[in-house]
Amino acid sequence: MLTLRQRLNHQSWLENLPVFTAFSIAAAIIWFADIHRGSIALFLGVIAGVLADLDHHASGRVKQLFVILPAFTAVSLAVQFSIGNSILLTFIMTSVAFCATMAGAIDVRYRTIAFATLVVALYTTLPYESQLAWYLNPMMLIFGTIIYHSSRVAFEALFPCRPVQRGLADAFRALASYVAAKAPFFLPDERSVLEHNQYQLALRANKVNTSFNTCRDRLFYRLSGQHISHRTRRQLHDYFIAQDIHERISAAHVDYEKLLTALQHNDILFRLERMIRLQSKACTAYANALEQEDHYHYPPALARCEKGLHHAWQFYCRHHAQRPNQRLETLIANLCTINAKLAQLGSIPDSTQSEDSRVINSNAANLREGLQRLRDNLNLQSVYFRHALRISFLTLISCFIVESFHLHFGYWIMVTCVFICQPNYVATESKLLLRIIGTLAGVVVGSFLPLIAPDRISLLTLIVLCNTAFFYVRTRNYGVSTFFITVQVFIGFAMSGIDMHVVVINRIFDTLVGTTISWVAVFYLWPDWDYFSLPAMTSAVLRSDAQYLRLILSQVGKNRDDIRYRAARRCVHESAAALPVLLNDMLAKPQKYQQNIEKTRLLLTQNYRIIGYISVLAVFRGTLCIRAETQQYMNEIGEQVAQLLDDLAQSRPINDALIALKKRVETDYNDPEIEPFTYSIARILKQLSAINQLIYPNKSTTMGAEQCSGTNCDNTALSAVQKH
C-alpha cells in the first residue's frame, strides 16, 4: 500500500495538478464574474495553453509566453475579423494549417507551438456569435492561455525537478523492459528462437530511445544558464547511468547460439538469465522510487546472484583449465559492472559537474538552422511536407463545406480533421473508430446533462473534471479522451444557453464527415506507401553505423570525448529506430509489401547486431595502453569496415573487398592483444555479408560457410575483452 506522502508525490497526480488548477481558476472566474457568453472561449483558451506547453524551468516558461501569446493573438484576431468573408477566412485557415504543420520540421518547440496556434485558429470559430463584441472571444482565448501558463510556472517554481524526475522514471521503466528482453538470450531451451528474441529486443529499443531523448531535453533546459543544484546533478548522473546500462546490455560479447550449445548443461546460463531479470527488476524499482519520491535500495537478491555467479564461474574454470572461456568471463564482468552502476543510482559523484554536465539537445540552434531545416523538407519525400499538404487540403474542403451549406457549428469538421489526421496512415486509422465511439458515448451522456447537472455550479464542477480527465487520458486512451472532450463541449453550450438538440445533431454529423474525409486524405493523397524506400532507409542506417564506428576509432588510445561519443551513439540508435516504424507502416498494407516486410524484419535484427558488435569496440576508447603499431592496425581495419558500410549504403559492390578483409582479419585473429577487436570486426563483416545478400541479391555472391562465419571464429575459444 502506498503511504499518503507517496500518493501525493505520484507522477499521475502531480503532472495533472497544474491542469486541474488552471481549469478551476477559470471556473471560479466564470462563477464570480457571472460570465455567460465568453465561458466557452475561456475554457478553450486553457486547453490551447495546455497544448502549447513546453517543458522548461520557471524563467524559461515565462520567456516562452512572449512567443506563444503574440502567435495566439495574431491568429485569433485574423480569424475573428475574417469570419463573414468566406474567401478570406478560407485563405487564412488554409495558410495557417500549412505553415503550422510545416513548422514541425524544425524541431519539437516549433511543432508544439505551431500546432497549438492552429488549434487557436479553429477555436476562434467555434464560440463565434455575431452579437458578441469582436474582441471577446480572442481576449478570452488569450486569458485562458495566461491562466494555464501562470499555473504551470507556479508549479515549476514549487516542484522544479519533477518533470526531469518523471522523465527519468519513464526512461528507467523503458530500460527495464529492454533489459528483460535480453534475458531469454541465455535460456538453453530457447536456442531455436534466438532470431525472434533479437527481433523483440530491437523493437523495444525504439521506446528506450524516445524516453532517453525526452529525459535529455528536460535535463538540457534545467542545465542551460542555470546553477546546477545537487538534485539536478544526481538526476544527470542517473541519466548517464541509464545510458551506460543500455550500451552494456546491448553489447554482443559472445555468439549466443554457440554459447547455448557449449553450456547447455551448465547452470551458468541460468544464473546469467536470472541476473539480467533481477537487473530489469532493479530498473523498475528505481523508476517507482523516482515516481513516488521514495528511497531506492540496491536489491540484496542481485548481490547474492552476483556472488553465486562468481562461484559458478570459478567452479567452471577449475574443471575446464585447458579450455578457458575468456569471452564468457568478459560477459560476466560486463554484467557485474551493470550491477555496480545500479548500486550508484541516486548518488552524486564529484566528477559530474565538470565533464558530465554537458548535454546536447536536438533543437535548432538559431533561425538560420531552422530555415535550413524547412528548406530541406520542402519536397514530397518529406513526411512533414506531405502532411502539411493533406492538412491544408482538409482545411480547404472543411471551409468549403461549412461556407457552402452554412452549417451551424460546422467548423467541428475541421477540428476533427486536425486532431485525427496524422502524418502516416497507421496512426490515423487507429484514431478513426475511437473518435466516432468516443463522440457517440459523449453525446449520449451529454444529452442527459439537465438531469446530471441541473444548476450552474454543478456544470462548472463537471466541466473542470471533464477537461482534467481529458488531458489525463489523452495519451493513454484516445477514445476515452474524446468522450470527455465531447461532454465538455455539451457543458459549455449548456452554460451558454444553446439548444442541446441542435448541438447533438451537429456534433455527430461533423464527426462523421471529419473522420471520413480524413481517411480519404491519408489514403489517397500522397500515401506513405508511395514513398516507402527500403534501400534509402538501409542507406541511412548503414551510414550512421559507419559514423559510429569511425567515432570510436578516432578515440582509440586517446583522450575520450564523451560528448561526441554520446551524440554518435544517439544518432545510430535513432537511425535504427526508424526501421521498426517503417515495418509497422508496411504491416498496415501486408499484401502490397509482403516481400519487403520480411526483408525489413531481417534488416532490423541484423543492424542491431552490428550496433552490438560496434558497442563492444567502445572498450578501446582512451582506456587502454595500446602500442602504436596495434593502434595503426585497428584504425586501418576499422576504416576499411566503415568504408564497406558506406559503399553498401551507396549500392556500390563490396564482395571482393569484403572477402579480402575477412581473410585478413582471420589471419590476425589469434593475436591476443587485438583478438577482442578482430572478433567484433569479424562478426560485423558477417552481418554485412548478410545485409548485402538481403538487399542486393542480384549484386552479391554468397560467401562460403567458412567465409561467412569464419573458420577461426567458430573454432577459436571465446577470449578476453578488457573490462569496459
Image: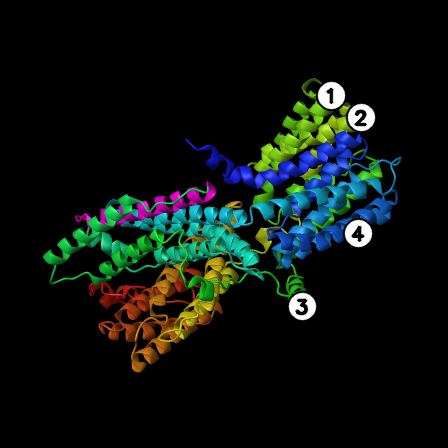
Determine the CA span between mark 4 and mark 3: 24 Å
Determine the CA span between mark 2 and mark 4: 29 Å
Say which residue label 2 marks.
497
Q: Position of residue 96 (x, y in %)?
A: 75, 52
Picture quarter containing residue 667?
bottom left
| Secondary structure under the numbered disc 4 in the rendered image | helix
Q: Is residue 497 above or below residue 475?
A: above
Start-end of magenta stretch: 264-292
Q: Magenta region, mostly helix, strand or loop?
A: helix
Q: Which mark is residue 455?
A: 1
Say which residue label 3 marks.
368
Residue that extends furthest to the bottom in the rendered view of this protein: 629
| Secondary structure under the numbered disc 1 in the rendered image | loop
Q: Are marks 4 and 1 in contact (CB under 8 Å)?
A: no
Which is nearer the N-term, disc 4 or disc 3?
4
Q: Are marks 4 and 3 in contact (CB under 8 Å)?
A: no
User: Alpha-carbon neighbours of circle 4 within 10 Å: few (<14), some, or many (≥20)?
Assistant: some
Determine the CA span between mark 3 and mark 1: 55 Å
Q: Are marks 2 and 3 in contact (CB under 8 Å)?
A: no
Which is nearer the N-term, disc 2 or disc 3?
3
Q: Is residue 394 visible?
A: no
Q: Please tell me whether residue 286 belongs to the stretch shown in magenta.
A: yes
Q: Position of residue 533 (x, y in %)?
A: 53, 58
User: Alpha-carbon neighbours of circle 2 within 10 Å: few (<14), some, or many (≥20)?
Assistant: few
Relative side of 252 to 105, left or right: left
Q: Please tell me whether residue 516 belongs to the stretch shown in magenta.
A: no
